[in-house]
Image: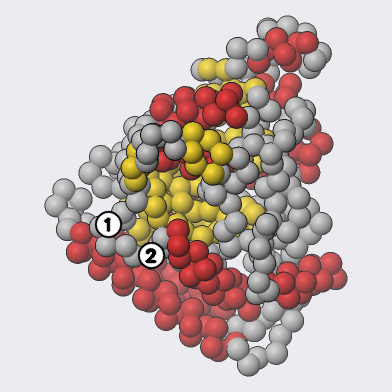
Amino acid sequence: MVALGNSTKDGSVIFAKNSDRQPNEPLIMIRIPRKQHGEGAKVRCTYIEVDQVKETYEVLLLKPSWMWGCEMGFNEFGLNMGNEAVFTKEKYGKDSLLGMDMIRIALERCRTSNEALDLLIELLGTYGQGGDCGYEKKFTYHNSFLIADKNSAWVLETAGEFWAAEKVKDVRSISNCLTIGRNYDKCHPELVRHAVKKKWCKSEKDFHFAKCYSNPLVTRFSGSKQRLNASRNILEKEKGQITVDTMKRILRFHGDKVKGKQFTKHSLKSVCMHAGSIIGDHTTGSYIAILNEKLCTYLITGSSTPCLSIFKPFWLTKEEIFSFREDEEDAAIDYWRKRELLHRYILENKVPNLHSYYTERDLLENRVDEMLASLDIESVSEGRLLEIMDFTLTREEELIDKTIAAGINRKGKVKGSPYFRHYWKKQTKNLYRPRAKF
């Protein structure tokens, strides 16, 4: 989701996303510096090679550990992007570019949302989209994208080779469904004619992108409409006064039927998704971007389950902290898995005082909020930004260590339905086994 400056309290653009993936799949933080590349170079993506450019920009990728691309991320110019799986009537293509690959390529090569939109459309036309996106089970889909910079944002939704794009006017959210209808700003030249030819609509006047191209059955069972409505309703209600706290509350939103029960039942229809059913995945990572011309600030969990996690501040400082290089993938996975152990302890009721954990978590986040509010973005030093990051990371590590230590020798078991208990027992058994995607 995104709120442009005309909808936020302080005039910043605020971008936020949850990554819903298979629950044992680490979502890791990889920082890649600006690089120069030789003439005629190629770059190997997840499944195919594509032409490289002479220079790629510095990026921070929040990516499934086995993929080349990323679920979400940003670059040195404050360009932010994320994608969602969507389910359409168009056939799923052979191995080509994943939506996640397309995001990384655009972040490495573009400075603005307009540039990124044009490049995504070009990549789709040149290479196509396709390939298995699953970690422990096969999963294929098409992609929708939310693209934002310091001044503007776009939604791009695809169905095979076809696409439609809508320029964001104030607030916007996407989910695992096509959301563009009759009104769009750009589209594939054959978008409408193809739908008419397929008899999905009678004429251009009758055309509605989501209704024509969506696979209604899979989309319905994805729970996407409920998640979309939850985020959309809160954004619309708070339009003009949207803050980082608004985005945190949405990313952690469960709804009345799940609230307080999220560790004993699955919640496919919650923005903060909890696995534990035959269908549906788990929120494996979350982040929020506060974008303005003076300073871009990022709040990243680096862990699954945002209702449990701590949003920690991040800046692209010269000194690297709270991120990992490409050759440090094992350390990045260990960082995610340590925090995932805390989540599994809570599922297994090994944490003796969860209320105490939440109290300390909230106190830490409130302290960080105070530190961020006190920053003079006109003159803040890199040293001060590093101090804030180091303070937060140290306090989070202490809290996690203390909470895990309190439960390490305790006996406990997962509560909930028989299937829920079986599901998480199996997932936790497999979590720390070495596994290679290929």
Q: Nearer the viewer, residue 160 or 310?
A: 160
Give the residue at x 66% y 63%: 436
In the image, which disc is placed on residue 317?
1
Total marks placed: 2
Q: Label 1: state its secondary structure.
A: loop
For disc 2, the neighbor class at 10 Å (few under 14, some 14 to 19, many from 20) is some
Give the residue at x 76% y 55%: 137
Return the x and y of residue 233 as percentages of the image width and height: 56, 40
**Amino acid beneath label 1:** Thr
Quarter containing the C terminus = bottom right
Return the x and y of residue 231 as percentages of the image width and height: 56, 44
**Amino acid beneath label 2:** Phe
Q: Nearer the viewer, residue 196 or 370?
A: 196
Q: Label 2: state its secondary structure.
A: loop
In the image, which disc is placed on residue 322?
2
Residue 183 appears in view: no
Say if mark 2 contacts mark 1, CB within 8 Å.
no
Q: Which residue appears farthest toward the front when viewing the image?
A: 39
Return the x and y of residue 393 as percentages of the image width and height: 38, 71
Looking at the image, residue 350 sits to the left or right of residue 59; the answer is right
Q: From this view, report whether residue 412 is shown above or below residue 48.
A: below
Return the x and y of residue 247 as percentages of the image width and height: 47, 50
Give the residue at x 41% y 41%: 108
Give the residue at x 48% y 83%: 401
Looking at the image, residue 351 sits to the left or right of residue 167; the answer is right
Q: Quadrant of residue 125?
A: top right
Of labels 2 and 1, earlier in sequence is 1
Q: Which residue appears farthest toward the bottom when viewing the image?
A: 409
The alpha-carbon separation of the residues under discs 2 and 1 comes to 11 Å
